[in-house]
Amino acid sequence: QDLGVALSGSAEMGIFDNGNDNSQFFTDLDVTFTMTGETDNGLSFGATIDLDEAADRGEPGRFESPDVQGGENMFVSYGGATLTMGDTDGAMDAVMPEMALAGGSLADDETAHGGFDDQDGHILLGTDSGLSFDGAGDGQIARFDYSYSAFTFSVSAEQLNNGDGIDYLGVDSGDSVYGLGVSYAGDFSGVAVEAGLGWQTISDFADTYGIAATAGLASGVSFGATYSKTNLEDDVVTVAGLSDDSIDHYGLGLGYEMNQFEIGVNYGKYESDDYEVSGYGLAASYDFGGGLEMQAGYGNTEADDDLFDDDGFDTYSIGLSMSF
Amino acid sequence: QDLGVALSGSAEMGIFDNGNDNSQFFTDLDVTFTMTGETDNGLSFGATIDLDEAADRGEPGRFESPDVQGGENMFVSYGGATLTMGDTDGAMDAVMPEMALAGGSLADDETAHGGFDDQDGHILLGTDSGLSFDGAGDGQIARFDYSYSAFTFSVSAEQLNNGDGIDYLGVDSGDSVYGLGVSYAGDFSGVAVEAGLGWQTISDFADTYGIAATAGLASGVSFGATYSKTNLEDDVVTVAGLSDDSIDHYGLGLGYEMNQFEIGVNYGKYESDDYEVSGYGLAASYDFGGGLEMQAGYGNTEADDDLFDDDGFDTYSIGLSMSF
Amino acid sequence: QDLGVALSGSAEMGIFDNGNDNSQFFTDLDVTFTMTGETDNGLSFGATIDLDEAADRGEPGRFESPDVQGGENMFVSYGGATLTMGDTDGAMDAVMPEMALAGGSLADDETAHGGFDDQDGHILLGTDSGLSFDGAGDGQIARFDYSYSAFTFSVSAEQLNNGDGIDYLGVDSGDSVYGLGVSYAGDFSGVAVEAGLGWQTISDFADTYGIAATAGLASGVSFGATYSKTNLEDDVVTVAGLSDDSIDHYGLGLGYEMNQFEIGVNYGKYESDDYEVSGYGLAASYDFGGGLEMQAGYGNTEADDDLFDDDGFDTYSIGLSMSF
């Protein structure tokens, strides 16, 4: 482990359709700055930022404002205890495994479809896919993890309004998101098992719990399932004009790895009495070694109500992915 | 060749006049991220971006959007064949040598005058100096090069509207720029010769061909000439209110290198029945070694019609150029 | 000394109150690019920029415009003589020691209070705290330093309007800021003394002189004092509706270092017949080694006139500071 500032990079080239039915060129690139340090008594610390978070298209230079999060994160760690702040997952997102189990694609089609849950945000708040409340504030999250044997316990907090209270949809929603979670990563006679149970809440607005597990067999096959549920406060249901006070998500994933080849498929669905969105995604990759992969992805979204104008849309991407 | 992410940099300090007749301070700096990889079977790949392209003043963070080009480029190469995508030259620009043959300047005065042709864009579209159609879309170019002996064959494409058709000046112009080119780099009894022949087209709008050659003698003297011509479709001529359906450019360059000293001069002219712009540029440099150069440049632009309010303008710059 | 481009970094995590009485999360990070070169005959040169200056939140990519300063600076040096351009201090700021003598804080509370003078700008022009004219133009400063024995002599210039004249408050103020300064750094029987005397002027607008000195004892105690005074031209006083043609600043600092622990306190006051602002700041730090520090800071600003609506405000921050 080198101390100081280390650089790593990635690039992608190919073609894709972002859902508008035009195939077009795809070019993307990123550089990551990883900083690592260690005190005399063995406490370790570090920080990272990506070039595309620093020079962000939507909010350039946001990382230089200490009161908000603009892609920067930093941690301090001692023994099994770690405190991370900034651009990091809330406790629920941190502990729950996702369903894209193998392969990958340039445009992340397999995780960008409408039925996927990456637990990075909440579908009702429009912060990202998922039923977690990460990003309900400015994304500046503090999470404490403690590892003990095969278990990791996580607690997280995010301020909704830089320490002030906030109204969501006209409902006084408190001032913070809190999260709790526990994850397990272990081996049962050759089967690699990961599982997580998480909970998050914005008091007076809603809470969500979620559970997910994956298993990886020695044959290269892996599979998993995820379930999460948001319960909305009565006020929120009334004010938002909903009829259902809950939203469910469930998802399934399947992956297969054989030598240089990987393929993954996943399906997911959001459900409430008010709306329903589902989707599936496919990703395949072939590894040339040295950091070069050929990748292809496909995503398909179906909405059974009037959330979208038509019944759905699909996206694909294919090309080369490089890591340096 | 180191694999991974490498950094290089440049900086310039001095004074300059950008054409407004005020001498002012000149400070500039850049950092380049160069990423290099190689697969197990010898296929090489890489990518680059500059800090001033990432944190761009006009369009910060544009490189993170895969559907447009924001300074990023990447390639994959095997044997004599290379595919490059993103911020790269179209086939015509790639093969044609330019006329700034020796020296250099802080503000690039010698190549920024109105008569220069760097083949980076088209004078009629206002994308850059030149008669090429690079940048007519979003600058996301794909170019395939194949080298055989002293020759390199190039083919390129750029989508005009992310896969959709586009109107230029009210004329339905198709959906892509295509380019072809061949270049030669060789040695004739001590004379280093570079030559290129290129062609580019936007169907239903215009096409351009160009030819250029340079020769470098053992005495340190080098010289060259360039010629290119755009033929506009009749529709374009009518709609744009022009009387001439073609635009010509020709240019000449002369350079001299002696020990640490270099000086270059070039002249160029755009001509059609509708307008005429010419200019010349001078650049001189003295190399202190280790990456430090003293540089001076001068550029003079003359317009014989009413394209500019006065007859012309001139620019200069002088100072230190550093490379790291 | 490595030639080429070197990276260093910093990160901070904690909580703070920026003066609005809400305690909130604090996350900050930066990466510095330091470029260094040397010619064959021993002339050294270099340049630096920070990632948060390149991808600046207010003016992203400003460093790529050579006519303004966007965080970049570069120098060339030979023997005791150094010429620096760009984001560097004017002669007065360069020579005068500041009063924050020990400790440090995440939000720089100890130097951000209203009575502090960092000589980075002028309180009347609103460019920064201080009575210097740095930043009165676009911040593109050229400074020449010559070191002789324990003394360094400095001369600086900044163009107010890229080589053109400018009006400040309706008063024709010339076209440049000029500065002069001399600093001393030496040792008197175990007492480390730093002192500086500086002067800056915008002709036809105002001039400022300043003097400051600090002393560091072997016991770990350090102390210092600073005084500066701006004299405004009569025209400026009239046009700005002021009654006093001068502004005074004085400040005091005290620091103490013991093993891993540091604490500093400073007080300062701006005074004229027209307004009066004072403040004090506290900073403490504990060094864990390897680049990790625990830091706490507090700043308090008091205004005795109607410059602020209330009598004052205070800020604090506490957390971890990392350097890589």
Image (cartoon, coloured by chain):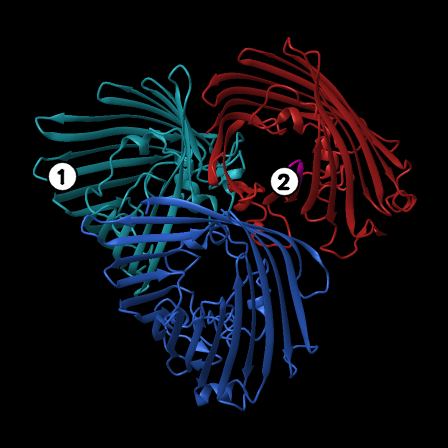
Chain colours: A blue, B red, C cyan
Secondary structure at badge 2 equals strand
Q: From the top left corner, tell me how far across and down residue A30 is, in percent.
A: 51, 50
Residue B303's image quarter? top right
Label 1 crowding class (10 Å Cα cut-off): few <14, some 14-19, many 20+?
many
Residue C148's image quarter? top left
Task: Give the chain letter at badge 2.
Answer: B
Taking B83 as reference, is B252 above or below it? above
Q: From the top left corner, tell me how far across and down residue A269 is, in percent.
A: 56, 80
> Residue C11, which numbered label?
none
Closer to the camera: disc 2 or disc 1? 2
Decide if residue C85 is in sight here. no
Please name the residue that numbered disc 2 is placed on. B78
Q: Which amino acid does label 1 sit on?
A: Ser
Residue at image location 72% in from the left, 34% down from the top: B93
To the question of a shared chain for discs 2 and 1, the answer is no
Taking A251 as reference, is B277 above or below it? above
Magenta stretch, residue numbers: B78-82
Q: Which residue lies furthest to the top in this view?
A: B219
Is residue C73 found inside the magenta-colored segment of the image?
A: no
Is residue B81 found inside the magenta-colored segment of the image?
A: yes
Q: From the top left corner, tell me how far across and down residue C92 is, in percent.
A: 32, 31
Secondary structure at badge 1 equals strand
Is B155 in front, or is C271? B155
Q: From the top left corner, tell me how far across and down residue A284 is, in percent.
A: 59, 62
Q: What residue type is labelled 2?
A: Tyr
Chief secondary structure of the magenta span? strand
Residue B164's image quarter? bottom right
Please name the residue that numbered disc 1 is placed on. C222
Decide if residue C321 is in sight here. yes
Label 2 crowding class (10 Å Cα cut-off): few <14, some 14-19, many 20+?
few
Q: In this view, does B288 lie to the left or right of B207?
A: left
Residue at image location 71% in from the left, 55% down from the top: B162
